[in-house]
Image: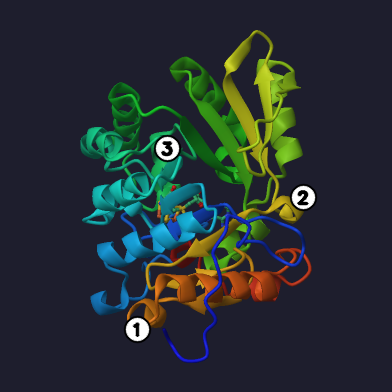
Amino acid sequence: MAQGMLAIPITETALADRFGRRISYLRISVTEHCNFRCSYCSPAEGTPYFSRKDHLKPEEYDRLIGIFKNMGVRHVRFTGGEPLIHPHINTLINSASRHGIGKISVSTNGLLLGRKAPGLRESGLNNLNVSLDSLEPDIFEKVTRGGDLQRVLEGIDAAIAAGISRIKLNVVLLRQENGHGLPELVRYALNRRIDIRFIETMPLGSAGTEAQHGQYLSASEAQSLIEAALGKLYPTTRSTDNGPARLYHLAGNTTTQIGFITPISDNFCATCNRVRLTATGRLVYCLGQESGMDLLPLIRSTYHDAEIAELISRGIWQDKPERHEFVNDPERSSRIFMMRLGG
Ligand code: SAM
Ligand code: SF4
């Protein structure tokens, strides 16, 4: 055991913060690279290079997932950057599955889903979010800086055909690019009997900050645009694992849930249950702030799992901020790099 450490029994209550929030959700950004360059997320030139030796290896992810599982984590999401470009994404999903994580999710831009969907399902994936900001090829290409809409749509169909159980579309609200196309996106989700969620643009990094200034569209305005075209949206009873989304459905159709996520217009930090892990092993306590702890040196030293768990537990307890500061301190949030942190 490392000097000065105290072994404590790790229980399910080990992950909590000073504000009474239990942490049960770990979002892992497995790469900061991406095959798209979305205007609200990525610099046009892509992300800075990190040496491969500074990235967690599959066996290191496996160990950390085991530690978090023992501390009460029940939901792991693999994100990025684009997680499907990670050469071992199936192995990582399988690690979560073997550790008994009940809900295993991936957030993807869908470009590689066409060939990867069956393997993801076999590895244990049971929840999939696909980003889809427009159904118009030229707008899609503009927003993603070159993305191929047709391939993404084929990918979504491949995921449905593979039988991945819960599929959701994620739409970032962009006044000029997709304000007019929101009802069409809802119709698309209805036709495929999948869920859809609309997210207010967050001022993260220079890309997010620019998009937020020029394109902000609130969730309530988006809801009005959808209702004007498709009819009234009725609140759906929340299940406990929907996170911050406010959920609705159209009259006579409860299969497709239509959600709105309001990081800007209606802060939901009081119910935050998540922390984030970057591909370089940094544990980050809040999407909108920089506080966190570097786990890579710990797992590459002689620390035992229980000691690492104790450090994580203390770090979250002491330093997880009460809330993001997108609105009060935009300068601070604009320094955050979404693709490193994993959206
Ligand atoms: N590449 C994958 C994807 O696009 O789904 C996973 C990573 S991406 C960073 C995760 C989510 O963050 C996506 O739904 C994306 O639309 C969202 N996102 C990125 N930048 C954002 C911003 N500035 N505001 C709101 N959501 C953002
Ligand atoms: Fe890539 Fe996803 Fe960011 Fe778009 S939102 S640039 S697909 S990481």
Q: CA distance from mark 2 to mark 3?
A: 26 Å
**Front disc: 2 or 3:** 3
Local crowd size for mark 2, using a 10 Å CA cut-off: few (<14), some (14–19), many (≥20):
few
Q: Amino acid at mark 3?
A: Leu
Q: Which residue is rendered at x = 36% and y = 68% of the image?
A: 45
Q: Residue 257 location, x and y as percent? A: 60, 25
Tags 1 and 2 touching, CB below 8 Å: no
Quarter holding residue 153: top left
At mark 3, the secondary structure is: strand
Q: Residue 249 location, x and y as percent? A: 66, 20
Q: Amino acid at mark 1?
A: Thr
Q: Nearer the viewer, residue 152 or 92?
A: 92
Q: Earlier in the sequence, mark 2 or mark 3?
A: 3
Q: Label 2, on which residue?
A: 265
Q: Which residue is rendered at x = 24% and y = 39% of the image?
A: 116
Q: Is residue 314 above or below residue 123?
A: below
Local crowd size for mark 3, using a 10 Å CA cut-off: few (<14), some (14–19), many (≥20):
many
Q: CA distance from mark 3 to mark 1?
A: 36 Å
Q: Label 3, on which residue?
A: 128
Q: Residue 71 location, x and y as percent? A: 53, 59
Q: Going by the picture, which residue comes out furthest to the top?
A: 252
Local crowd size for mark 1, using a 10 Å CA cut-off: few (<14), some (14–19), many (≥20):
few
Q: Is residue 4 above or below residue 339?
A: below
The N terminus sits in image quarter: bottom left
Q: Amino acid at mark 2?
A: Ser
> Which colouring convention does the figure follow?
rainbow
Q: Earlier in the sequence, mark 3 or mark 1?
A: 3
Q: Is residue 228 above or below residue 78?
A: above
Q: CA distance from mark 1 to mark 2?
A: 46 Å
**Front disc: 3 or 1:** 1
Q: Label 1, on which residue?
A: 302
Q: Going by the picture, which residue comes out furthest to the bottom?
A: 3
